[in-house]
Amino acid sequence: MNMKRGLFIINPSSGRQNILDTVESIIGKLVMREICDRVEVFYTKGKDDAKLRAMELMPGQYDFVVAVGGDGTLNEVAAGLYLSKSNIPLAVISAGTVNDFANYLSLPQTPEPFVDMIEKFECLSVDLGKVNEEYFINVVAGGMLTDIAYKVPKDKKAAMGKMAYYLEFIAEFPKQLLDSGIKLHVESEEFTGDTDAIVFIITNTKSVGGVANALPLASVEDGLLDVMILKRVNPLTTPDAIVKFLQSEHYKAEDIEYFQTKKVRIEQIAGTPIVLDFDGEVLVDNLPAEISVIEDAIQIIMP
């Protein structure tokens, strides 16, 4: 059996406090079970460290790379691997607060199942999204409550997990509901027009913000992005939207525009300027945004 070479790219400041113990156990098992004869570790110290390290990789340099951190760390490693053109498969150990991508694909997060997965080494080709000059593996969003991810302090996320987000949501929701909303101009083959909106979400997976079926038609391997725009709330149709949400059929609700596309352009034409979020990071150049899908961009190691 040919033993493998692995690189672990680790964000040591991610939310899960016991993550380094988990990684140490995984590396020990990979070596003791003679699955790997070489394992290297790279710790990030700041923004883009993970992306730059992954970008340096050459084809065949490692058999696999492991992203250890939250959705932001995964975003950086995935983008770096794509830009490196190394085609090295990626495994994921989630250490963030929400971990949408890993939850969506049911990726193992404890040592024994994770090591079994590396030993079997089955891969899935997945799509990436591109927003202006950045990349995303899970979601781009703008509007009401999409800034919660970076409003909550890191120490609160580490101590409280998802509850920190829920408390911020409770505090912010009434204030943002009173806001006048935003007016968007949307251009795609499937839908073009102006719309008054509260929030828009463009995603590669079904899971957003810890909601497992937020975009129920989405898939990482269909070559499409799923776009959902929540329009200004109409009190008469809100109960229907809530019922449909509980049945994972909210994309059919009157107050929601939902479509799948390969490319969409979104421009804000009125309202308080919004911040665009991609995989929990802030997009510097913001709107207008050109958003597209890159098919079969990277290989994900699956159980």
Image (tube, rainbow, N blue to C red):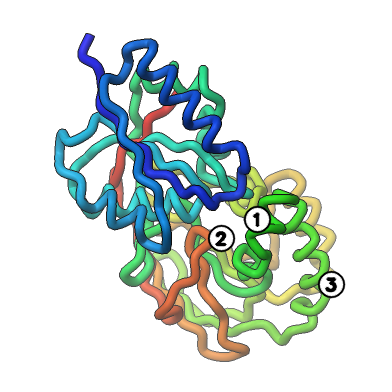
Under mark 1, the amino acid is Lys
Residue, disc 1: 252
Q: What crowding class fits label 3: few (fewer than 14 Cα within 10 Å), some (14-19), or many (20 or more)?
A: few
* As drawn, 120 above or below 134: above
Tag 3, which secondary structure?
loop
Q: Residue at x 26, y 20 (%)?
A: 37
Q: Which residue is mark 2?
A: 258
Query: Which of pointers 3 and 2 lies earlier in the amino acid sequence?
Result: 3
Looking at the picture, does residue 1 appear above or below residue 199? above
Mark 1 and mark 3 residues within 8 Å of each other at the beta carbon: no
Q: Nearer the viewer, residue 9 or 187?
A: 9
Task: Work out how far the residue at label 3 is from the one at label 2, CA to CA, in angstroms.
Answer: 20 Å
Could you tell me which quadrant the N terminus lies in?
top left
Identify the residue at horizontal 15%, vertical 34% (top origin): 60
Residue 228 to residue 122: above or below: below
Check disc 1: other Cα within 10 Å, few if <14, some if 14-19, many if 20+. Answer: some
Q: Secondary structure at mark 1?
A: helix
State the residue in front, 297 or 195: 297
Q: Is residue 65 left or right of residue 200?
A: left
Q: Position of residue 107 (x, y in %)?
A: 51, 31
- Mark 2–mark 1 distance (CA, rounded to whole Å): 8 Å
Determine whether, in the image, residue 5 is placed left or right of residue 187. left
Figure quadrant of residue 52: bottom left
Name the mark on residue 235.
3
Q: Position of residue 240 (x, y in %)?
A: 80, 58
Q: For residue 57, which numbered disc appears in the image? A: none
Q: Amino acid at mark 3?
A: Pro
Residues under numbered marks 2 and 1 in contact, where contact means CB atoms less than 8 Å apart:
yes
Residue at position x 22%, y 33% in the image: 62
Q: Is residue 292 left or right of residue 283?
A: left
Marks 1 and 3, how far apart at CA: 17 Å
- The answer, for residue 177, to whether it is visible in the render is yes
